[in-house]
Amino acid sequence: MAFTKILQLSDLHLTTPGHALFGARPDERLAAAIDLICREHGDALFCLLTGDLAEAGDDAAYAELARLTDRLAMPVHPMVGNHDRRSALLKYFPDAGDGSGFVQRAVETPAGRLLLLDTLDPGHGAGLLDPQRLAWLESQLRQHAGPVLLAMHHPPLAVGIPSMDQYALRNAEEFWAVIEPHRQRIRHILLGHLHRPIGGSWRGIPISCTHSPNHQVALDLVSLPPDGAVPGCQEPASFAVILIDDDSVVVHHQAMDEGGKRFPL
Ligand SMILES: [Fe+2]
């Protein structure tokens, strides 16, 4: 089986078009990522956007997201993060929800069923899967046999960055209780929120995360400032290019700036 390619862009943090955020223009950064996708990855099956699509959840940001992503040849699957507002996202991307009001749904791939989870808890930086969303996940897992991939903005695990670990999924144990009976067929969990390329596993299930196109979380494994602030930085941005077949899930991080001309090694 040939690889299926999917793309993951995360934490776009779009502002009102033209407004900078942390020294960069999120609309320009997303446009640059889309240029790169059009040049290098136009054969992807779809592009997954793992939350924090708008910095402040305003309509103008989602309108800009719809305008910019309209250039992509493949379908786009937006998800919510803690910065998002469901009603505004669904106004511009009505197919992103399942009709429940949550931004959750299932997407078929040749290598398994991808479940897109909604971990937004409005007003809070940390994530939550309430009983209604957990029931949806449980029913998706129970009703459909075969391999599964999950995507969710908030990580269910601590990653050793104290300033971010305080904003992880709050009820990871309840989430685990739902997925644990199916763990052998859960192939991978794609995460947002962390603004860093991270790989590893949680209780035996592989996980990965990718940069933001606009601004990153510094690799500060030690300190939690008294005010709890997250240390930001402008290390080079990337997005994930994920190759999947029946045997493997391979996560590449596509740098948005390769750093000059290629050369023979
Ligand atoms: Fe974010």
Image: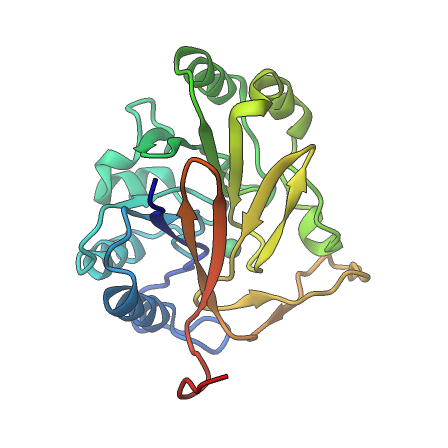
In front of the other: 68 or 45:
45
Q: Position of residue 134 (x, y in %)?
A: 51, 20
Asked if residue 121 can be seen in this view, the reply is: no
Residue 84, horizontal then vertical, whole percent: 42, 46
The correct choice, above or below, for 242 with respect to 80 in the image is below
| In this rendering, position of residue 224 left or right of residue 37 | right
Quarter of the picture containing the N terminus is top left
Taking the spot 41% from the left edge, 49% from the top edge, the residue there is 243
Residue at (32, 32) in percent of width and height: 107
Residue 9, horizontal then vertical, whole percent:
40, 56
**Residue 64 left/right relative to 167:** left
Q: Residue at x 53, y 38 (%)?
A: 189
Between residues 113 and 220, which one lies in front from this camera angle? 113
Q: Is residue 83 above or below residue 220?
A: above
Q: Nearer the viewer, residue 40 or 98?
A: 40
- Is residue 187 in view from this perspective? yes
Rendered location of residue 191, percent (x, y): 53, 45
Q: Is 130 left, or right, of 3 in this rendering?
A: right
Residue at left 44%, top 13%? 139
